Image (tube, helix red, strand yellow):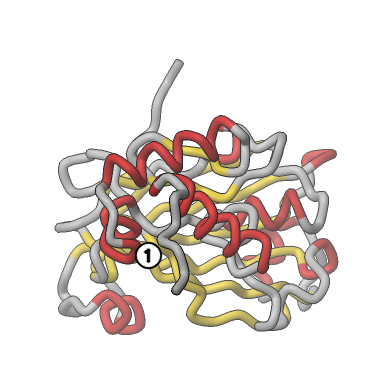
Amino acid sequence: MSQPSTKPLYRIVEDYLIAFIESGELVSGDLIPSEPQLAATLGVSQGTVKKAIDNLVWEKKLYRHQGKGTYVSRLDFNNSLFRYVSYGDVQGADVRIDKKTSNRHIESGNKIVCRKMNVPEDTDLLYIERIGYVAGNPVMVEYSRWRADMLPGLENEDIHVPDLFYAVVVDKYNVPVVRAEETLTAEITTKKTAAILGIDTSSPVLVLNRRTFTRNNQVIEIRTTKGRGDMFSYKTEIT
């Protein structure tokens, strides 16, 4: 008869998370399951889960972003990667948003997008579409186009796209994210966005247009994020 494990419960939680990281199922930039989810899955208290996560944060295997969740880390992972991740609920409070990639492919850039990216018309661009969920409900959708020559192969669905997309850009492709320009507006939703978010076509959505730069003032991304007006907000901090 096997002897019951004498390993502390928080170590069991640590081992569980490390196994996912070492297997490659969770990679740098991935949002790990929430503390309540882990507690329910492993049959332990949330306090035990918090202790395990705190230990892994101290060891720099995880990175805790206040109000957003905890991410798989790198040794040089820091708050700079979150400068452009400031979404919240309708009251403006920080909220955990789980993002899933719903579409990605290579396409020829049209005149408008290519002009914004300072590249010739019909340049190959990587199209990435991601849906953000809060408690299982879609609250936002991102439509982004990237310089395909800087992210070769990422259109392949076998390559995992983490929740924090910029982490794979920096970590896997060694392309630094230097700065971004953003414009926030509002509009009546399109049929496509309405279908994704499960809202009426007459509903208002917040629209965040972003242009992201790497070294030498090169544009690497053009993104439009659309969020439900009744469940989504965008927050910025001026220091």
Residue 48: x and y in percent read 33, 43
In the picture as drawn, the residue positioned furthest to the top comes out as 239
Residue 80: x and y in percent read 60, 33
Up/down of 21 relative to 76, above or below: below
Give SS at disc 1: strand
Residue 82 falls left or right of residue 190? right
At 72% from the left edge and 82% from the top edge, which residue is drawn? 156
- Count of numbered badges drawn on the protein: 1
Quadrant position of residue 165: bottom right
The residue carrying mark 1 is 132
Residue 234 falls left or right of residue 101? left
At 22% from the left edge and 48% from the top edge, which residue is drawn? 89
Say which quadrant the C terminus sits in: top left
Quadrant position of residue 223: bottom right
Residue 21 falls left or right of residue 154? left
* Of the pair 31 and 14, the residue shown nearer to us: 14
Amino acid at circle 1: Gly
Residue 177: x and y in percent read 69, 43
* Of the pair 96 and 53, the residue shown nearer to us: 53
At 82% from the left edge and 61% from the top edge, which residue is drawn? 150
Can residue 153 be seen from the camera position used here? yes
Can residue 205 be seen from the camera position used here? no
Up/down of 143 relative to 78, above or below: below
Say which quadrant the N terminus sits in: bottom left
Residue 20: x and y in percent read 57, 64
Up/down of 227 relative to 90, above or below: below
